[in-house]
Image: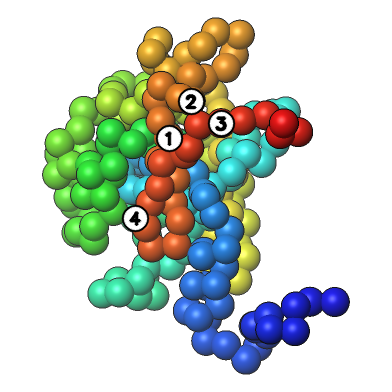
């Protein structure tokens, strides 16, 4: 039985935004997919998304959920989703703590013709298997080709097959492991961010 003092919430009784706040404050910490994409006109775009995970090990596939625009762009389609639909290629860059401010800068609402690489002071690094650049300053980047887009309610699940992974030397331990303690991934909480404490193994002593 649940604690008698527990708060119970039924989605049908709540506003969408209130249920959303409960979920993003509970499903934590979340990794951040820093997606670089390109419009069919060739304009580069860079934006972070924290509804992000591995979808399949074979073929290696990453999943990002992209919601509708919010605030002044409420109800619009995000440029990242439009670009992925049109070009079918993109890069998922992973965000270390040291790039928190540039990542935040790239999350701000700007006109579609604005290049977030430039506004955030970042360097486009040419990819090898696709025609969309990675963030050179990011320690880890996955070049992806679109597999499929699945509509789920107001949001879109974007599945991309990894074509190539690039891991910088100072982020790599060898034996296909990353040096997490060294590159220090940034995690998304509800409205805030966090660093990860030193890792440990189970069971604890």
Could you say which disc has been placed on residue 204 in the image?
Answer: none
Locate the N terminus by quadrant: bottom right
Task: Determine whether, in the image, residue 145 is placed left or right of residue 59.
Answer: left
**How much space separates mark 2 and mark 4, taking CA atoms?**
31 Å
Task: State the residue in front, 129 or 141.
Answer: 141
Asked whether the beta carbons under mark 3 and mark 2 sit within 8 Å of each other, the answer is yes
Classify mark 3: residues with Cα within 10 Å, few (<14), some (14-19) or many (20+): few
**How much space separates mark 3 and mark 4, taking CA atoms?**
36 Å
Residue sitting at the far right: 1
Which of discs 1 and 4 lies nearer the camera? The answer is 1
Residue sitting at the far bottom: 13
Classify mark 2: residues with Cα within 10 Å, few (<14), some (14-19) or many (20+): some
Residue identifier under label 4: 79
Task: Locate residue 4, reporting x and y percent.
Answer: 75, 84
Task: Locate residue 187, reporting x and y percent.
Answer: 44, 45
Could you say which disc has been placed on residue 185 in the image?
Answer: 1
Badge 1 or badge 3: first in the primary sequence: 1
Task: Determine whether, in the image, residue 176 is placed left or right of residue 116.
Answer: right
**Considering the numbered disc 1 on the image, is that residue within a helix, a strand or a loop?**
loop
Which of discs 3 and 4 lies nearer the camera? The answer is 3
Residue identifier under label 2: 180
Identify the residue at image location x=18%, y=42%.
Answer: 120
Task: State the residue in front, 43 or 175.
Answer: 175
């Amino acid at each position: 039985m649940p604690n008698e003092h527990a708060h119970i919430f039924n989605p049908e009784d709540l506003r969408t935004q209130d249920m959303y706040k409960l979920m993003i404050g509970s499903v934590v910490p979340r990794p951040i997919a820093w997606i670089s994409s390109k419009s069919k006109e060739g304009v580069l775009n860079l934006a972070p998304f924290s509804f992000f995970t591995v979808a399949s090990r074979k073929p290696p596939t990453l999943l990002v959920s992209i919601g509708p625009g919010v605030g002044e762009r409420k109800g619009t389609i995000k440029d990242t989703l439009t670009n992925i639909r049109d070009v079918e290629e993109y890069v998922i860059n992973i965000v270390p703590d040291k790039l928190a401010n540039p990542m935040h800068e790239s999350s701000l609402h700007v006109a579609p013709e604005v290049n977030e690489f430039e506004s955030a002071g970042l360097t486009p690094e040419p990819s090898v298997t696709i025609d969309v650049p990675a963030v050179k300053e990011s320690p880890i980047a996955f070049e992806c080709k679109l597999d499929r887009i699945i509509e789920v309610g107001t949001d879109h699940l974007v599945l991309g097959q990894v074509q190539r992974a690039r891991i910088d030397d100072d982020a790599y331990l060898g034996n296909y492991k990353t040096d997490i303690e060294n590159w220090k991934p940034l995690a998304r909480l509800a409205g805030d961010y966090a660093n990860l404490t030193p890792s440990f193994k189970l069971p604890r002593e």
